Amino acid sequence: MKGVNASAPWEFTLLGFSDRPRLELPLFVVFFISYVATIFGNLTIILVSRLDPKLHTPMYFFLTNLSLLDLCYTTSTVPQMLVNLRSTRKVISYGGCVAQLFMFLALGATECVLLAVMSFDRFVAICRPLHYSVVMHQRLCLQLAAASWITGFGNSVWLSALTLQLPLCGRKEVDHFLCEVPALLKLSCVDTTANEAELFFVSVLFHLIPLTLILVSYAFIARAVLRIQSAEGRRKAFGTCGSHLIVVSLFYGTAISVYLQPPSSNSKDRGKMVSLFYGIIAPMLNPLIYTLKNKEVKEAFKRLVARAALKKEMKDMQMVSF
């Protein structure tokens, strides 16, 4: 950032919901509970998927990546938001704002690609079941996961650099609860049409293209499932895909409404609420969606609890014998 008035500020003020002070305490409680639930739920999925040998499959490998992503997603924004909700000075340092912007962009783009990868995994599992172990081998799974993360972080480097090089005209108030591109563009004193066009292009690239691939994959999946003769087989196939479809709908529906809809008179508040949903609520709901509709995860969790209880009982018996 250049010039006297356009120099990099030491800190930004995140206005958030400061125009509605009565909401701050209830929101603090809701966000705190959501954050704790997100940490607990996603850590549970990661631990269960890694500790139970029966879940060492491509599906749960990608689910572990999604849970790790959701953990990082919320941790990059929620702690600062909680501090600001209970503080009179709702500020974030310049470095903190840059880090938050970078991580939010990187993790959001990574999730777009990862959800498409997960739909491809389900496509192969249901439409090519006899070739599943050959196609979805460990090396390919690692490559697909790595490609998702690298693509997401590469996109963030580009968009963050384009946003942060814009000069600011002395205004340091971000009309949002986090440092997000649309909110930061409003602080610039130059024409941001080119940046908005680049943001729209990236949004199309990371939202509509993966979503199209997901929809095509599920069109083939639906056709394959309808050909299954047994009702139990169809129910099991729809069950494994239903959770992923719900997560896709929650994430893409809210993200597209922020980045691809034209601005309107209520776009400011709409953007805040939608960002809250896909940045806080969706990561909290994802573990619930995958566990409530997935017998394998619930059974694996029960096995781990039983194993831990047995180890504790044996340890207690050894202590008594001594």
Image (cartoon, rainbow, N blue to C red):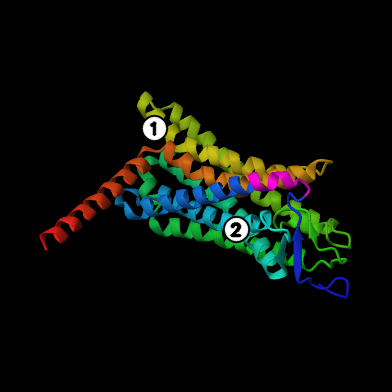
136 or 168: which is nearer to us?
Answer: 168
Q: Position of residue 186 (x, y in %)?
A: 83, 56
* 157 drawn magenta: no
Considering only vertical position in the picture, is 3 above or below 135?
below
Considering only vertical position in the picture, is 46 above or below 208?
below
Q: Where is residue 94 in the image (x, y as percent from the top left)?
A: 72, 69
- The residue positioned 19% from the left and 56% from the top of the image is 316
Residue 260 visible in the picture = no
Helix, strand or loop at mark 1: helix
Helix, strand or loop at mark 2: helix
Q: Is the magenta stretch mostly helix, strand or loop?
A: helix
Q: Give the range drawn in magenta.
A: 19-26
The mark nearer the N terminus, 1 or 2, is 2
Classify residue 8 as left or right of residue 177. right
Classify residue 35 as left or right of residue 303. right
Q: Position of residue 201 (x, y in %)?
A: 74, 52
Classify residue 274 as left or right of residue 192. left
> How crowded is the residue under tag 1: few (<14 C-alpha within 10 Å), some, or many (20+)?
few
- The residue positioned 88% from the left and 71% from the top of the image is 5
188 or 19: which is nearer to us?
Answer: 19
105 or 80: which is nearer to us?
Answer: 80
Q: Where is residue 123 in the image (x, y as percent from the top left)?
A: 47, 41
Classify residue 197 as left or right of residue 31. right
Write down the residue under mark 1: 236
Quarter of the figure with residue 148 = bottom right
Q: Which mark lies nearer to you, 1 or 2?
A: 2
* Amino acid type, mark 1: Lys
Write down the residue under mark 2: 79
- The residue positioned 55% from the left and 51% from the top of the image is 35
Quarter of the figure with residue 180 = bottom right
105 or 14: which is nearer to us?
Answer: 14
Considering only vertical position in the picture, is 102 above or below 279?
below
